[in-house]
Image (spheres, helix red, strand yellow):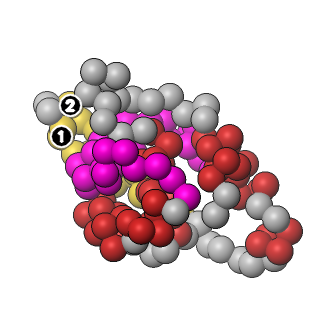
Amino acid sequence: MKTDSFLQYFSQIIDPISHINRIHNLNTILLIGVVATLCGVETWKQVEEFAIAEEKVLESFMSLPNGLPSDDTINSVFSSIDPKQFEICFVNWVSSLPESFQRLVIAIDGKTVRVEKTRGVKVPVHILSA
């Protein structure tokens, strides 16, 4: 996977995590989440388990100076980013893929799950399935 292209398309997403508490790069979390989802995972815990199982592969195309993010961190980031902004970035990125990939049909479905309370604040959980 060519990460430069991915990062170019997702660079406009605003990082919701305070710089004081930031341990992982936003692009790392987004890339792990998208790759895991494209590989069929469905929950934040499964994203974390996928990343652990595929850590060597992930390290071959991304820097992980602070290790892998936890499922709670992944959940927090994906729950905090603007879903419309993410959708635009994702569609633009997929549209940029080589024509050989574009002939493949990948069904993509997104939904917002029941509101969950995080630190006293109601945060919707967004799920993308491919």
Q: Name which residue lies at 31% across and 45% down.
A: 66
Q: Quadrant of the C terminus?
A: bottom right
Mark 2 highlights which residue? Answer: 121
Q: Residues within 10 Å of mark 1 (few under 14, many from 20)?
A: few
Look at the image and say whether residue 89 sits in the magenta stretch.
yes
Instruction: In the rendered structure, find residue 63 and report the number of the disc placed on it.
Output: none
Q: Answer yes or no: do the residues labelled 1 and 2 have beta carbons within 8 Å?
A: yes
Q: Spot the residue most to the left.
A: 120
Q: Spot the residue most to the bottom.
A: 104
Mark 1 highlights which residue? Answer: 117
Examine the residues drawn in magenta and state their main secondary structure.
Answer: helix
Q: Amino acid at mark 2?
A: Val
Spot occupied by residue 1 in the image (x, y as percentages of width and height): 64, 63
Q: Tell me if residue 91 comes above or below residue 79 in the rendering.
A: below
Look at the image and say whether residue 6 sits in the magenta stretch.
no
Q: Which residues are magenta?
A: 61-90
In the rendered structure, the answer to whether residue 127 lies left or right of residue 13 reads left
Spot occupied by residue 48 in the image (x, y as percentages of width and height): 30, 62
